[in-house]
């Protein structure tokens, strides 16, 4: 029954179908590794880890409860267990103590559970409901949108190639488009196996969903009465620059902020005025800003153009269709895009965001629009031939301007004749290639691809499910960092997260008391007094929540163990 198994009776009953799920039962335990991760339970439940789960997910009869699987995956993310396979090198009995079980499921069992939970559209529905809850709780009206490329290095899936900016290479990958809040908090993610680029994703997937889900939008009557009022604001980078897109979204009364791709000549320096800008962190910074109006005649749209003058003299141009916010507010929102980039970096490094969850693959729908491989090959030939032609013409130019002795001049003339013949042949070949490329459509549907070039994709629902778990873990960790900063003025922004990681991996004693209905979690004393003060403050903030451990009647009580043993206290 596996290493660490003690509840053999329930496991036998579950194996023959006589048990729906085992009861959660905590026992007295000392020095439990990763026991500090239990401090995150109130935040995980508040963020929504177990919200809407019973309505969307079901597991057949077995030993493990549905809630135990969700808690295990969230605790793994916070304790930085990099993948499900990494559990092979963890003590299953010690992890089981954190969940009130004799042991956690082994890797094979956990993968079977994950497959059952993600065999339909349940992860998508669950994520959508949580996203709507988060938007209502945050009163969100400003959304950052950006793409993230997940590189695939396996050989089972035949994915299209994407340009990966952080590696400066075109690699097999899939694209995810994330929607985040002002401080970087994630709302939802849109997976794209064949990347149609940001503009199309905004038009077809993101903005229609936001129009349905963003809370507290102005009514139709309010929009009619106030012609400059907008529903909400989306912020994206230069990839989405399109005056037509700005105009189309303003017809829906959706405001946009983006960088101007073609700003033109620099403005006069005397136009730039100092503004006090409040950053996301709450700090205030002085920026030199200037503003003008710009009219896109083809789309009948007036937009605001705001420029920031840097110390080096560079002018960064912003286009904006938010006509109500002041200049400093618009600049603060646009230049806070780094918070989303930091989110991607942090999630890759700490939560293993790009990790492949399942090796299963599935076909891409036949109606998916993809690049025609014949067109891509011809385009490559055109580029290659053009590069050769440019070099030959440069050689001809160099030979024609060279001077020397009569014998050298004769050799140069002979070489120039050969170059002229080569250039003429290359010109003819290039014309033929360009005509062939023109005759072949650039895009076709996936169903029109030849069998040997058919594209497929990795299983989407499992990845979407784990991404949602990691979003919940990140939101819970962020909420806890706010509590930590109330007690300690940390010099660096990430210090609170570093301290939380050490707390999650700290040992703890578990003391259940059925009579009083409590489960006391005693965190071992950390290395420094300052860290101990912060942990004590965290315990003082968490205890009033009176969190009940899921599946039990035990109220969580968090304590910090004194650094002195009883004998030392007597002395």
Image (cartoon, helix red, strand yellow):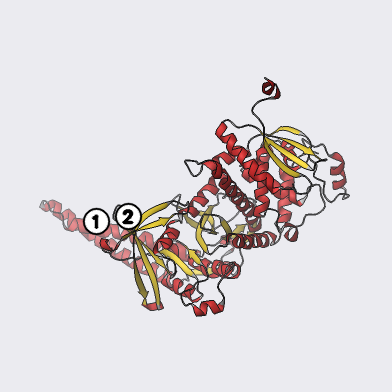
Position of residue 299 in the picture relative to residue 549 (left or right): left
Q: Quadrant of the N terminus?
A: top right
Q: Nearer the viewer, residue 472 or 108?
A: 472
Q: Looking at the image, which residue sits at the far top?
A: 571
Residue 232 % position (x, y): 52, 68
Residue 6 % position (x, y): 82, 36
Name which residue lies at 74% across and 55% down.
Answer: 116
Name which residue lies at 68% across and 25% down.
Answer: 565
Residue 271 % position (x, y): 28, 64
Q: Which residue is mark 1?
A: 395
Q: Nearer the viewer, mark 1 or mark 2?
A: 2
Q: Dot 1, how many residues are within 10 Å of its Cα: few (below 14), some (14-19), or many (20+)? A: some
Residue 3 % position (x, y): 77, 35
Q: Dot 2, how many residues are within 10 Å of its Cα: few (below 14), some (14-19), or many (20+)? A: few
Residue 264 appearing in the image: yes
Name which residue lies at 50% across and 48% down.
Answer: 345
Q: Is 332 placed above or below 94 here?
A: below
Q: Is 9 placed above or below 460 here?
A: above
Question: In whole angstroms, how far apart are the C-alphas of marks 1 and 2?
Answer: 43 Å
Q: Which residue is mark 2?
A: 310
Q: Looking at the image, which residue sits at the far left?
A: 405
Q: Nearer the viewer, residue 528 or 439?
A: 528
Residue 83 appearing in the image: no
Sequence-wise, the earlier of marks 1 and 2 is 2
Q: Quadrant of the C terminus?
A: top right
Q: Is 568 placed above or below 118 here?
A: above
Q: Residue 570's image quarter?
A: top right
Q: Is 421 placed above or below 16 here?
A: below
Q: Does dot 2 land on a helix, a strand or a loop?
A: loop
């Amino acid at each position: 029954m596996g290493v660490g198994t003690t509840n053999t009776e329930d496991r036998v009953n579950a194996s023959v179908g006589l048990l729906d799920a085992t009861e959660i039962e905590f026992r007295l335990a000392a020095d439990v590794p990763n026991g500090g991760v239990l401090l995150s339970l109130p935040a995980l439940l508040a963020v929504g880890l177990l919200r809407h789960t019973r309505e969307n997910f079901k597991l057949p009869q077995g030993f493990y409860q549905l809630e135990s699987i969700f808690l295990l995956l969230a605790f793994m993310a916070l304790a930085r267990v990099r993948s499900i396979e990494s559990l092979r090198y963890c003590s299953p009995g010690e992890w089981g103590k954190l969940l009130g079980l004799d042991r956690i499921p082994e890797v094979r069992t956990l993968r079977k559970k994950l497959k059952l939970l993600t065999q339909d559209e349940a992860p998508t529905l669950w994520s959508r409901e949580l996203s709507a809850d988060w938007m209502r709780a945050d009163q969100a009206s400003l959304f950052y949108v950006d793409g993230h490329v997940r590189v695939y290095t396996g050989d089972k899936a035949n994915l299209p190639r994407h340009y990966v900016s952080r590696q400066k290479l075109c690699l097999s990958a899939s694209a995810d488009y994330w929607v985040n809040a002002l401080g970087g908090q994630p709302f939802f993610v849109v997976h794209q196996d064949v990347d149609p680029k940001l503009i199309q994703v905004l038009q077809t997937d993101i903005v229609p969903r936001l129009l349905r889900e963003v809370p507290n939008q102005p009514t139709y009557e309010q929009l009619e009465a106030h012609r400059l009022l907008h529903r909400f604001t989306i912020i994206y980078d230069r990839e989405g620059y399109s005056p037509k897109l700005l105009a189309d979204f303003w017809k829906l009364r959706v405001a946009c902020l983006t960088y101007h791709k073609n700003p033109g000549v620099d403005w006069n320096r005397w136009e730039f005025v100092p503004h006090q800008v409040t950053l996301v962190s709450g700090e205030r910074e002085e920026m030199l800003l200037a503003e003008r109006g710009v009219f896109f005649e083809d789309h009948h749209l007036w937009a605001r153009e705001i420029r920031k003058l840097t110390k080096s003299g560079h002018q960064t141009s912003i286009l904006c269709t938010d006509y109500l916010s002041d200049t400093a507010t618009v600049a603060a929102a646009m230049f806070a895009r780094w918070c989303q980039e930091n989110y991607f970096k942090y999630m890759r490094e700490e939560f293993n965001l790009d990790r492949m969850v399942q090796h299963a693959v599935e076909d891409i729908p036949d109606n998916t629009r993809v690049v025609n491989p014949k067109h891509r090959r011809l385009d490559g030939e055109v580029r290659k031939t053009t590069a050769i032609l440019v070099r030959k013409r440069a050689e001809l130019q160099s030979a024609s301007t060279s001077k020397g002795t009569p014998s050298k001049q004769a050799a140069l003339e002979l070489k120039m004749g050969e170059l002229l013949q080569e250039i003429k042949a290359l010109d003819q070949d290039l014309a033929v290639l360009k005509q062939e490329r023109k005759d072949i459509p650039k895009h076709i549907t996936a169903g029109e691809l030849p069998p040997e070039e058919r594209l497929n994709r990795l299983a989407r629902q499992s990845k979407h499910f784990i991404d949602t778990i990691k979003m919940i873990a990140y939101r819970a960790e962020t909420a806890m960092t706010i509590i930590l900063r109330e007690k300690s003025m940390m010099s660096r922004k990430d210090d609170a997260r570093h301290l939380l990681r050490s707390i999650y991996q700290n040992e703890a004693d578990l003391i259940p008391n059925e009579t009083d209905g409590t489960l006391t979690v005693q965190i071992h004393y950390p290395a420094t007094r300052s860290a101990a003060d912060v942990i004590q403050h965290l315990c003082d903030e968490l205890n009033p929540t009176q969190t009940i451990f899921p599946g039990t009647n035990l109220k969580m009580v968090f304590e910090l163990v004194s650094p002195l043993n009883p004998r030392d206290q007597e002395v």
